[in-house]
Image (tube, helix red, strand yellow):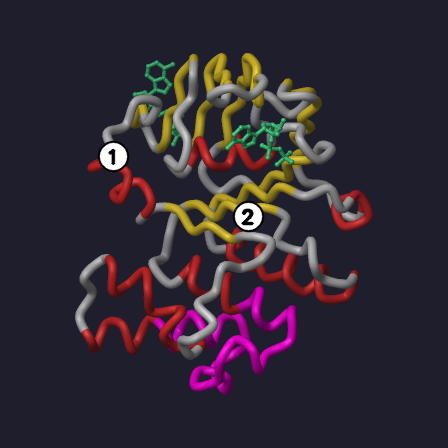
Amino acid sequence: MIRFEEVSKAYLGGRQALQGVDFHLRPGEMAFLTGHSGAGKSTLLKLICGIERPSAGHIWFSGHDISRLKSSEVPFLRRQIGMIFQDHHLLMDRSVYDNVAIPLIIAGASGEDIRRRVSAALDKVGLLDKAKSYPIQLSGGEQQRVGIARAVVNKPAVLLADEPTGNLDDALSEDILRLFEEFNRVGVTVLMATHDQALIARRNYRLMRLNQGRLHGGQSGQ
Ligand code: ADP
Ligand code: ADP
């Protein structure tokens, strides 16, 4: 599903964020990406969804080499990926419904399709009754669930999450992780960056540990 071959990333004027990273994430796998702040976790996720380009090496997504994608090709890649951020990036002046509808509107879905799929996504995260609310009226955990509904509304093959529980307490973090597990159970490939050791210690998923841009452990899928 996702394959990195000797991938390095140096930011302009910055230092090397990733060095010689190799791994293969198989379709339907669920894995955690760990490491200290600055280890390169966000950079690795941004490379997968085309926000950044590698300085060296190759990245394969579903059989396509995406290492040197043209800007015009990025939207096609994005449509196959649901991205979840720590601070959820919700539009605060739009309703929950409208926030979740955004990816479908961008993809040019019909009105009927949008209604059906937004309702289905909100139902999956348990927020159907909050469709008309505004993000500001929701708790932190609920806001993150809106971010997840928006990420899955397009039925992407892959979910990438960057510290999705970073602002949440333990119980809410568990809820969010259980949601990811439900999506994984129906075949979605999940890669989640986190430094929450307690959260991942209770589970037995593949761990990919980044240390100063180098990947230790978890290079090959099981
Ligand atoms: P993490 O997500 O593990 O905290 P990042 O991928 O955000 O790590 O950062 C890895 C390294 O790359 C850090 O040294 C960081 O300062 C640097 N970096 C990240 N983004 C940029 C950028 N846009 N420009 C320059 N340097 C960056
Ligand atoms: P998946 O896990 O979705 O099956 P893979 O990463 O195994 O995807 O790759 C699927 C296809 O991508 C391969 O059959 C091949 O066509 C292409 N591919 C992947 N890695 C390479 C590579 N190193 N060189 C050439 N083609 C590759």
Magenta segment: does it hold 127? Answer: yes
The answer to whether residue 169 is seen in the rendering is: yes
Assign the C terminus to one quadrant of the image: top right
Q: Which residue is mark 1?
A: 71
Q: Which residue is mark 2?
A: 161
- Which mark's residue is nearer the viewer, 2 or 1? 1
Considering only vertical position in the picture, is 2 above or below 213?
Answer: below
48 on left or right of 111: right
Provide the residue span drawn in magenta. Answer: 118-145
Q: Position of residue 186 (x, y in %)?
A: 47, 55
* Residue drawn at 43 percent across, 58 percent down: 151
- Dividing the image into four quarters, tell me where ligand 2 lies: top left
- Main secondary structure of the magenta stretch: helix
Per the image, label 2 sits on a secondary structure element best described as: strand
Per the image, label 1 sits on a secondary structure element best described as: helix
The residue carrying pointer 1 sits among few (fewer than 14), some (14 to 19) or many (20 or more) residues within 10 Å by Cα, namely few
Considering only vertical position in the picture, is 96 above or below 182?
Answer: below
Q: Position of residue 81 (x, y in %)?
A: 39, 46
* Residue drawn at 17 percent across, 70 percent down: 110
C-alpha gap between disc 2 and disc 1: 22 Å
Q: Position of residue 204 (x, y in %)?
A: 73, 41
The answer to whether residue 181 is seen in the rendering is: no
Amino acid tagged 1: Ser
Considering only vertical position in the picture, is 90 above or below 67?
Answer: below
* Residue drawn at 58 percent across, 57 percent down: 87
Question: Farthest front residue?
Answer: 13
The residue carrying pointer 2 sits among few (fewer than 14), some (14 to 19) or many (20 or more) residues within 10 Å by Cα, namely many
